Amino acid sequence: MILLGVLYGNVEELSTHYKRINEQYPVIVGREFWHRLTGREDFYMELINAIGEVAIEVDGSDLLIR
């Protein structure tokens, strides 16, 4: 079986390209993708929260071009 996994978002946000692919192959998006991959229903939200925490801690201002 072939399927396409999209790491984030939801089905309503899919581009026309992904919707076209979904006509032939299942496109699994965001929360459902991570649930199928890990077997944990809460994994997607835990991942989002962890990324948010790291983003708050990192000061990337020195990486910006002035």
Image (spheres, helix red, strand yellow):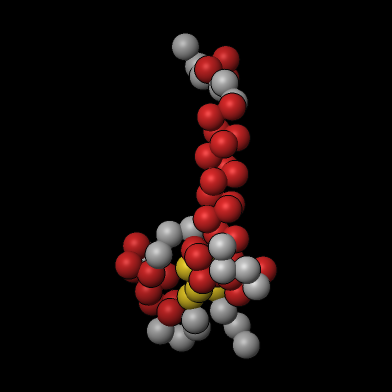
Residue, far top: 66
Choose between 57 and 27: the one closer to the eye: 57
Residue, far right: 38
Choose between 41 and 23: the one closer to the eye: 41
Q: Quadrant of the N terminus?
A: bottom right
Locate residue 17: give its quadrant: bottom left
Q: Which residue corresponds to the image point at 32% horizontal and 67% vertical from the top-left?
A: 12
Q: What is the x, y in percent for residue 27?
A: 48, 75
Q: Which residue corresponds to the image point at 44% horizontal and 77% vertical from the top-left?
A: 21
Choose between 12 and 55: the one closer to the eye: 55
Counting the numbered discs, the total is 0
Q: Which residue corresponds to the image point at 51% horizontal and 71% vertical from the top-left?
A: 32
Q: What is the x, y in percent for residue 57?
A: 59, 27
The vertical placement of 52 against 34, above or below, is: above
Left or right of 29 on screen, residue 20: left
Left or right of 32 on screen, residue 19: left
The vertical placement of 40 against 57, above or below, is: below
Q: What is the x, y in percent for residue 14?
A: 37, 65
Q: Is residue 5 visible?
A: no
Q: Which residue corresponds to the image point at 49% horizontal and 58% vertical from the top-left?
A: 8
Locate residue 13: give its quadrant: bottom left
Q: Is residue 38 visible?
A: yes
